[in-house]
Each structure stands twice: as structure tokens, then as C-alpha cells.
């Protein structure tokens, strides 16, 4: 019989759970596994038990039915808690109360539901009042329980309960919950029970076992909640993982002034600084700290002083317990060898640990923590390299606010998630998503965000909230997503109805532009100037460590000298793809290009090409200058010619004048160039085959420029001339001959030779299949995985948007195959081509230059396949360096 329940606390050790930490986590969920582990290393953890993730999967598959054995297992789990606490579940005199908590394999903060204080009913509340000697506390707990249970389990209207509480406070002339006395809570409980009966049609469940099973099912059910699904999609978490349920003895932070609850990070999750960082509240429970109802207090004295806050820090108010807590921080960091995110509660002076997990952090913090921990010897350099998520680096590679730029600061909130963002303001998540799809940069402005807002937060460039602290929902989620966020900006007054934002005497409406700086909390009017980041400090150090372990080369896709420079500064080791078509579009030459295309014969084309030669040579000269000493792969003209055609009368007239022919003749010629399916039409090497003079001109420009640079700098670049869209060996043979002939001509004219290669893009399935023959004529292959994906799947990338999301949702593709390589299908063609190419030419150079060259999962595939290099867009070069290092480490195992 499968064991589904695993106990923790009271020295039960693993209770049969796997000892391997990954397996334990898969079975018990992150929260359950860590609760058990903390209990095992002797930390004060309230006892409890975990119902495994396997049960969740089974529960979903079998339509919400439990196996009979589970009843008995849960009974024993409860007995285990009763034995250790000395209290009995449902006992009117001395009741045991529990929390029922969700906990998936991957942490999904705030995504699923928790019920606290379960086990209270009309009788046990009296018992709790007596044993605690605190009637107010007992009734406060009961009303919290009814409220949470009604929300999470019974799914009643949450707002009506909030409203009842607000009215109760108003009627009594109170402003805060803390002013409510025992009799007020008692009255509210009666009202809550009325609301339950009214909305649910049945009285609030008094049987504690009914309560327990209701909560367990609700937690399992919350795995299928809409917001959990969205979160999973955004974070690539498979639906079949399921969540575990943790049932745990309650401890109470709301038992008066010597009790408290808090959350903490062992290091600063924003900056990575090695300083305890957290928030706490006296006489509070559970989510009070993050809910934004009361303003939480600082944990350490230093942080309080820095923020210039009045309410005492925990260090000052409960110095002894604080000392215990920081000892636990150190112990946990050493144990898990990572920065931890911790929940704790103090019940009448006694410290209890309720959760620990690897803390979510910004890219900046991730870098600093990894480098610091490696420097301190807690982890190795290689572990540091393995720990930083390459995609997160994206945050650091984008422009930050220019410190010298003028800032019109409207107000300052908390620096909740670093980075600068600028965009138009919107007031709800649907609009944020919509406007982003329309191509706008948006700043999402909310009083406070909730889990329903993740799609909007994801779409937004930045998030601004009026309420909430550094550990509020907005702050935590924004840091996880790498979105700049300013939270708790008190000076904001937001009207969601009129879509107006007031800051002081300034008024902004939806669509107005705002800049936020998540690193210092500033909120600024208009757009503030930005500057380029540099790879210095921790970033530079980690990149060096990454370079030590990676095998794959990293090049860039770039075609302007500026882009080449950015990429080289980011560590690119060459150019993997320099497209030549954009050069044709420049205003100074488009007329000559059109003249060439519309020419009636070869002589006409040659005349136009002669005008283009010096321009093209200058393009290459500038690029070679930046990339001196490095390989530069230049792709000869690829797109269908009609893309360059004139549209307007005036454009036709210009070309007519330049070519000295009539406008009507040109128009007719343009019509003849029409194609039904241009992407499969007259493009790529087919242009070179039919109009050899085009490729000849380009080859000449390349070699002349290379010779010039060799002459002036003493060091030559290494041109790699790439023929696009080859399907047969003969095509490449013809094109290579033409290029070689041109090289010889130029070398003879210039009186010097330079090293160069001729190769092809592999972007058609036939080319992969025929790679053995093609390699007879090509010295390198570069996998053009954008086209290879299109041609293999028979899907046009430009039209895929309409259906691809559904394909991913329905599990047809694990991810968008244009973002992350379809390893299973397209990957086979790459493997095959690599193998056949190498069989013909042992030293053939293999690289990838599609969009996938900057995607970590695709890079891992390139490492597996033994390619020589990947090529990514300039800003992705550092990401590719790190991903290549991680792939090498993973392959080593
Ligand atoms: P989440 O995953 O959303 O953080 P949790 O299950 O961790 O949800 O619980 C929500 C809140 O309730 C947390 O602040 C947690 O510390 C608190 N909590 C959970 N279980 C207990 C317990 N047994 N005693 C006291 N507080 C608890
Ligand atoms: Mg938690
Ligand atoms: Mg292509």
C-alpha cells in the first residue's frame, strides 16, 4: 500500500520519506520537506504531517476521491501531533488547533491557500480562552478561522466578511483591529456565522474532522485554481507535479505583547548584501505582515535606523529571541548553503520556525550572493556559476537611469525591486496586458497587487503600489519576475473608477508617462534618460568563472558597428550572423538596390551593383574594425527581392531617373516579381544562382574590406562567407566557386592573402539530410534554427501567434518552438547534419545562429550535440556565456 502521510517533529525523523533532498522535495513539496528537515536538525518546529504530492495527483486523476487508507493515515498523523502537544483535536477543554498549508515542489509564493486556527468551534473556543487565559485572543482566532475557511474552503464572498469587520470597527469608533476587544470579536463571530449560513445555506461546520477534510480538499483543489495555472505557465511548472498538504500544530503570534510573527531573509534579497533583512509585527498572526493591513516593523536595529522608523525593531523589543532567531539564520544558511527566506512566530517569548526556503532574489542579489558565498568557501566557484539563472541576467543588461539626468521626483516609496522602468500608467492588469500587446511600455499602478494581478505584472515594465512593504505581494512577485517595483508609495492617491492618479497636487491620467526607480523608490514624471550597464564587479567575476568552465564558443548576431561593439564588450568571440539585407535598405542606397532589382538584364544589374559596391565595402570595413582578430560570419543576400520594391509613385520615379528607363516599364517589372509564397520563393542562394553578380559584388566588398583592415591594423578579421538557404550540394558548390574566384581576384589586386572560410546555413530539412555531401563544399555549417523550425514544422513564425499559445497550453509543444528549440524534432535534424557533416569533413565548424542561440535550454542542447559555438543577440551574449557554462557543468554531471 502506498504511504501518503509523512509525520514530522517530535523526533520521528524522516518517517519513511526519501533521504535524498530532491526526492524528498518532489514527494513532500518544498514546504513539507523543509519543515521535516528543520525538525530533524533540532530546530523548534511545531509538529505535524505532510500528505504527499502523489496524493494530489491521484486526487485530481480520480475526480476528488481519496483512497480508504488515507483516512487511517491522517488519523495517525493527528494522533502524532496530539501526542507531542498534549492537546486533543476537538477537545472542548484543551483543543489542538492546526494549520492546513499547501506546498508544491517549486515554491509558488501566495499562489495557493492556507487555513489557520482549524479546530475551533463554539465549544473549543471557550476551551482555548481558558487554557490561554486570554479571551480576546481566543475569539480573535475564531473569527480569523471562520473568515479564512469561508474564503478558502467554502469559497464564499470574501468582501462581505471584510465589510462586516470594517462596520464592526466603525460602529465602535475604532480605527485598527488591535482596538477590538474580546466582546467585539465575539459579536463578529456571530455575524460571520450568519453570513456563512446565508451564503452557504448551511451552518458553519462544527465537527473538527469535517473542517480538516474540507481544508485538505481545498488545498489540493487550489492546485487547479486559475491563478495557480497562470503562475505555472509563466514559470514552466508542470501541472502533474501537484501540491502537498501540510497539517501542523498552530503556534500563536497573536497571544499579546510577548508574541509576534515575522518573515525574514538571511541576506538582502534586493541587493544581496549580507545583512539580516525582514519584517515583523507584535501580536499578529500569519499573513498579517504581508497583508498590508498594519505597517510591519523592521527586524534589525540598523534597518530601522536607516529607514528612520519609530516602532522598535525586534532586535530592540525582543533582544533575546532575536538572538536565537539570528542563530537559526546562520545555521540554516550553512545547512542549505544558500540564502533563506524564513517565516517565524514567537508565542509568549518562545521562537517557532514555520518555513524556510531558498529565497527569491533579484539578479543583482543572485550574483552577489553566489560570488560572496564562493569567496567565503561556502560553495565552489562552479556552484556559484550553476546557481545564477542566466535569463535573470537580462535585468542587469538593460539600461539604468542616468545618474546625471534631470529627475522630476513626484514622491518616494520603498525600493521593492531594483531597476528602472518607464512607461505609460495603467490601473488594472487587463489593461496592462492589452496595452503591452499593442506595443506600449506600461507601468502598472495599484493600491496593492494580489495574485490575480500576475498577468498584468508580467506584462508591465514596472509596478507601482500605494500600499505594502518590502515583503508585500507586489514586492515579492516583482523581484521574482525581475520587474522594477516601487511599493508602499504613501503619497499616491489612486482612483480606479476615474483612472486618475494623484501625487501631491499633480494629477496623472491613464496613458501619462511615469518613470520609477526600483533601486531607490523614486517615482518621477515623464521619461528619464538611461545609460548602458557594464560587466563589472560581481557580474564580471561570475562571467570569468563561467568562461573557465564553458566549452562552447559564444558569438553574436550583429550587423551594425554599434551592436558589434556592445557584443564585444559583453564578451562575444566573433560574429555568428551578420545579415546584409538591412544594409540595402538604407536611404542612401535603396534607389540603387531597386535599380538593380528592376533591371531588365545583367548589364543593368551590374551597373547598379557597381554603385552599391563602395557602400557595402564600407559597411564591412566598419564591422571588421570592431571585430579585428575575430571570425565574422557574413550571410550573403537572403530575403525575397520584392521586399525592396518601391511602393509609391515618387519612389518609382526616383528609380526610373537613376536607371534611365520609364516608370511604366518599372511597374510592370515589379509586377512580374510578385510571388505567391515568397518565403519559399526566389530567395537565399537562389538569388545567387540566378543573379551571380549580386553575390560576386558582396564577396568582393568583403574581401576588399578585409584586406584594407589587414593593411591598416596589421591584424585581419576572419571572414566566414555564408550562403543561405542551401538545399543541395551543387548549389553550394556553385556559390563557393564564385566566392573563391572573387577572393583570388581581390588578393591578386591587393597583393595580400587573408584567411577566410566559405560555408552554409543549414535551414532546410533537405540540407540536414544531405549534410554529408554539402560538407564537401562547405567549411562550416551554421544552423539557422528560425527557418529550420519553420520548414520542419511547416509553421510560419509570423503567423504562429494565433495558435501557438494553445499548442503550449495543451501540451503539444512543451514551449514555443521559436523561443526554445524543439529538441525532439528539429534537434534530430541538427544532430544528423552535425554527424554527417563531420563524417565528410572532420574539422567542420558547427554553430547555431537562430534566435535559439540565446536560449539556455537550446544552448544545453548545443553542448550535448557538440557544436562549436552559439550565436546570440548582443544583449544575450552574457546570458549565453553563463548558460554555456552551466551546460558544460551539467554534461560533466
Ligand atoms: P504561503 O505558502 O502562502 O506562505 P503558508 O502555509 O506558509 O502559506 O502560511 C501562511 C501564513 O500562516 C504564514 O505566515 C505562516 O507562517 C502562517 N502559518 C502557517 N502555519 C502556521 C502554524 N502552524 N502556526 C502559526 N502560523 C502558521
Ligand atoms: Mg509561507
Ligand atoms: Mg533563414
Image: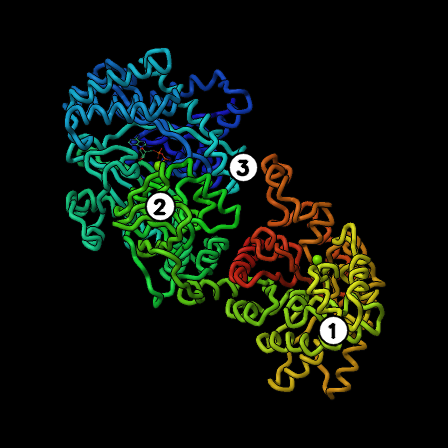
Other residues around mark 3 within 10 Å, as few (<14) / some (14–19) / many (≥20): few
Q: Quadrant of residue 219?
A: top left
Q: Is residue 867 above or below residue 154?
A: below
Q: Position of residue 507 (x, y in %)?
A: 31, 48
Q: Which residue does the numbered mark 1 point to in the structure image?
A: 658
Tell me the CA gap for discs 3 and 2. Answer: 25 Å
The disc at residue 475 is 2
Q: Earlier in the sequence, mark 3 or mark 2?
A: 3
Does residue 792 appear left or right of residue 428 in this picture? right
Q: Position of residue 481 (x, y in %)?
A: 44, 47
Which numbered disc, 3 or 2, marks the residue closer to the eye? 2
Q: Position of residue 261 (x, y in %)?
A: 24, 37
Tell me the CA gap for discs 2 and 1. Answer: 60 Å
Describe the element under mark 2 as helix, strand or loop.
helix
Seen as rendered, the residue at the extreme bottom is 751
Q: Earlier in the sequence, mark 1 or mark 3?
A: 3
Which numbered disc, 1 or 3, marks the residue closer to the eye? 1
Q: Quadrant of residue 162?
A: top left
Describe the element under mark 1 as helix, strand or loop.
helix
The front one of 832 and 231 is: 231
| Residue name at image x 47 percent, y 38 percent | 231
Other residues around mark 2 within 10 Å, as few (<14) / some (14–19) / many (≥20): many
Tell me the CA gap for discs 1 and 3. Answer: 61 Å
Residue 358 seen from this side: no
Describe the element under mark 3 as helix, strand or loop.
loop
| Residue name at image x 17 percent, y 23 percent | 171
Residue 287 seen from this side: yes
Q: Which residue does the numbered mark 3 point to in the structure image?
A: 238
Other residues around mark 1 within 10 Å, as few (<14) / some (14–19) / many (≥20): some
Circles 3 and 2, Cβ within 8 Å, touching? The answer is no
Q: Earlier in the sequence, mark 2 or mark 1?
A: 2
Amino acid at each position: 500500500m502506498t504511504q501518503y502521510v509523512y509525520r514530522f517533529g517530535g523526533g520521528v525523523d524522516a518517517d519513511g520519506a526519501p533521504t535524498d533532498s530532491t526526492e524528498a522535495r518532489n514527494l513532500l513539496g518544498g514546504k513539507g520537506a523543509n519543515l521535516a528537515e528543520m525538525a530533524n536538525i533540532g530546530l523548534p518546529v511545531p509538529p505535524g504531517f505532510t500528505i504527499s504530492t502523489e496524493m494530489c495527483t491521484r486526487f485530481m486523476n480520480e475526480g476528488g476521491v481519496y483512497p480508504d487508507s488515507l483516512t487511517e493515515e491522517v488519523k495517525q498523523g493527528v494522533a502524532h501531533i496530539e501526542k507531542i502537544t498534549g492537546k486533543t483535536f476537538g477537545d472542548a477543554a484543551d483543543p489542538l488547533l492546526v494549520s492546513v498549508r499547501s506546498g508544491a515542489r517549486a515554491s509558488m509564493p501566495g499562489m495557493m491557500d492556507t487555513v489557520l486556527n482549524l479546530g475551533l468551534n463554539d465549544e473549543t473556543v471557550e476551551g482555548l480562552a481558558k487554557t490561554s487565559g486570554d479571551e480576546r485572543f481566543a475569539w480573535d482566532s475564531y473569527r480569523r478561522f471562520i473568515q479564512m475557511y469561508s474564503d478558502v474552503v467554502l469559497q464564499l464572498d470574501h468582501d462581505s466578511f471584510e465589510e462586516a469587520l470594517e462596520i464592526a470597527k466603525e460602529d465602535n469608533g475604532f480605527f485598527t483591529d488591535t482596538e477590538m476587544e474580546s466582546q467585539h470579536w465575539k459579536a463578529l463571530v456571530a455575524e460571520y456565522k450568519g453570513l456563512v449560513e446565508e451564503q452557504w445555506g448551511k451552518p458553519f461546520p462544527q465537527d473538527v474532522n469535517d473542517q480538516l477534510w474540507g481544508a485538505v480538499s481545498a488545498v489540493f483543489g487550489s492546485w487547479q485554481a486559475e491563478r495557480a495555472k497562470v503562475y505555472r505557465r509563466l514559470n514552466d511548472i508542470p501541472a502533474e507535479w501537484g501540491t502537498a498538504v501540510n497539517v501542523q500544530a498552530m503556534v500563536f503570534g497573536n497571544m499579546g505583547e510577548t508574541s509576534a510573527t515575522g518573515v525574514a531573509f538571511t541576506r538582502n534579497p534586493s541587493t544581496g548584501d549580507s545583512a539580516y533583512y525582514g519584517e515583523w509585527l507584535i501580536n499578529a498572526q500569519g499573513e498579517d505582515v504581508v497583508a498590508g493591513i498594519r505597517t510591519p516593523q523592521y527586524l534589525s536595529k540598523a534597518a530601522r535606523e536607516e529607514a528612520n522608523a519609530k516602532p522598535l525593531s525586534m532586535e530592540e523589543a525582543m533582544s533575546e529571541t532575536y538572538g536565537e532567531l539570528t542563530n537559526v539564520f546562520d545555521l540554516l544558511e550553512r545547512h542549505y548553503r544558500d540564502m533563506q527566506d524564513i517565516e517565524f512566530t514567537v508565542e509568549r517569548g518562545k521562537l517557532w520556525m514555520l518555513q524556510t526556503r531558498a529565497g527569491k532574489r533579484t539578479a543583482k542579489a543572485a550574483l552577489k550572493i553566489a560570488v560572496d558565498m564562493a569567496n567565503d568557501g561556502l560553495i565552489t566557484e562552479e556552484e556559484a556559476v550553476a546557481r545564477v539563472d542566466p535569463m535573470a541576467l537580462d535585468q542587469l543588461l538593460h539600461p539604468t537611469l542616468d545618474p546625471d539626468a534631470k529627475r522630476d521626483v513626484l514622491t518616494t516609496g520603498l525600493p521593492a525591486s531594483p531597476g528602472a522602468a518607464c512607461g505609460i500608467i495603467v490601473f488594472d492588469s487587463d489593461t496592462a496586458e492589452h496595452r503591452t500587446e499593442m506595443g506600449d511600455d506600461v507601468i502598472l499602478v495599484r493600491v496593492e497587487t494580489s495574485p490575480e494581478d500576475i498577468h498584468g505584472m508580467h506584462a508591465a515594465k514596472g509596478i507601482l503600489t500605494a500600499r505594502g512593504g518590502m515583503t508585500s505581494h507586489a514586492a515579492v512577485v516583482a523581484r521574482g519576475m525581475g520587474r522594477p517595483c516601487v511599493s508602499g508609495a504613501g503619497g499616491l492617491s489612486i482612483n480606479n473608477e476615474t483612472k486618475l492618479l494623484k501625487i501631491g497636487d499633480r494629477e496623472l491620467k491613464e496613458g501619462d508617462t511615469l518613470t520609477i526607480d526600483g533601486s531607490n523608490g523614486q517615482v518621477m514624471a515623464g521619461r528619464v534618460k538611461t545609460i548602458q550597464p557594464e560587466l563589472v564587479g560581481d557580474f564580471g567575476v561570475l562571467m570569468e568563472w563561467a568562461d573557465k568552465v564553458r566549452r562552447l564558443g559564444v558569438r553574436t548576431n550583429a550587423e551594425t558597428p554599434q551592436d558589434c561593439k556592445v557584443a564585444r564588450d559583453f564578451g562575444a568571440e566573433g560574429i555568428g550572423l551578420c545579415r546584409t539585407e538591412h544594409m540595402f535598405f538604407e536611404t542612401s542606397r535603396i534607389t540603387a538596390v531597386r535599380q538593380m532589382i528592376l533591371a531588365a538584364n545583367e548589364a543593368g544589374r551590374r551597373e547598379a551593383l557597381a554603385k552599391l559596391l563602395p557602400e557595402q565595402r564600407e559597411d564591412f570595413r566598419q564591422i571588421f574594425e570592431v571585430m579585428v582578430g575575430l571570425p565574422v560570419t557574413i550571410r550573403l543576400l537572403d530575403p525575397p527581392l520584392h521586399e525592396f520594391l518601391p511602393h509609391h509613385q515618387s519612389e518609382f520615379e526616383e528609380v526610373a531617373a537613376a536607371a534611365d528607363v520609364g516608370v511604366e516599364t518599372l511597374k510592370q517589372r515589379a509586377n512580374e516579381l510578385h510571388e505567391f509564397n515568397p518565403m519559399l520563393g526566389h530567395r537565399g542562394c537562389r538569388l545567387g544562382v540566378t543573379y551571380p553578380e549580386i553575390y560576386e559584388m558582396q564577396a568582393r566588398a568583403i574581401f576588399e574590406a578585409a584586406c584594407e583592415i589587414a593593411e591598416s591594423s596589421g591584424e585581419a578579421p576572419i571572414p566566414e562567407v555564408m550562403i543561405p538557404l542551401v538545399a543541395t550540394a551543387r548549389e553550394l558548390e556553385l556559390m563557393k566557386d564564385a566566392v573563391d574566384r572573387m577572393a583570388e581576384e581581390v588578393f591578386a589586386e591587393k597583393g595580400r592573402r587573408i584567411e577566410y572560410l566559405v560555408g552554409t546555413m543549414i535551414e532546410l530539412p533537405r540540407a540536414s539530410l544531405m549534410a554529408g555531401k554539402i560538407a564537401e563544399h562547405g567549411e562550416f555549417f551554421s544552423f539557422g534554427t528560425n527557418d529550420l523550425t519553420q520548414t520542419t514544422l511547416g509553421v510560419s513564425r509570423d503567423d504562429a501567434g494565433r495558435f501557438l499559445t494553445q499548442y503550449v497550453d495543451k501540451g503539444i509543444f512543451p514551449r514555443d518552438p521559436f523561443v526554445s528549440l524543439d529538441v525532439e524534432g528539429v534537434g534530430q535534424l541538427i544532430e544528423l547534419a552535425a554527424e554527417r557533416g563531420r563524417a565528410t569533413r572532420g574539422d567542420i565548424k558547427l554553430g547555431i545562429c537562430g534566435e535559439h542561440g540565446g536560449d539556455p535550454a537550446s544552448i544545453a542542447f548545443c553542448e550535448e550535440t557538440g557544436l562549436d559555438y552559439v550565436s546570440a543577440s548582443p544583449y544575450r551574449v552574457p546570458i549565453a556565456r553563463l548558460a554555456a557554462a552551466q551546460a558544460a557543468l551539467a554534461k560533466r554531471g
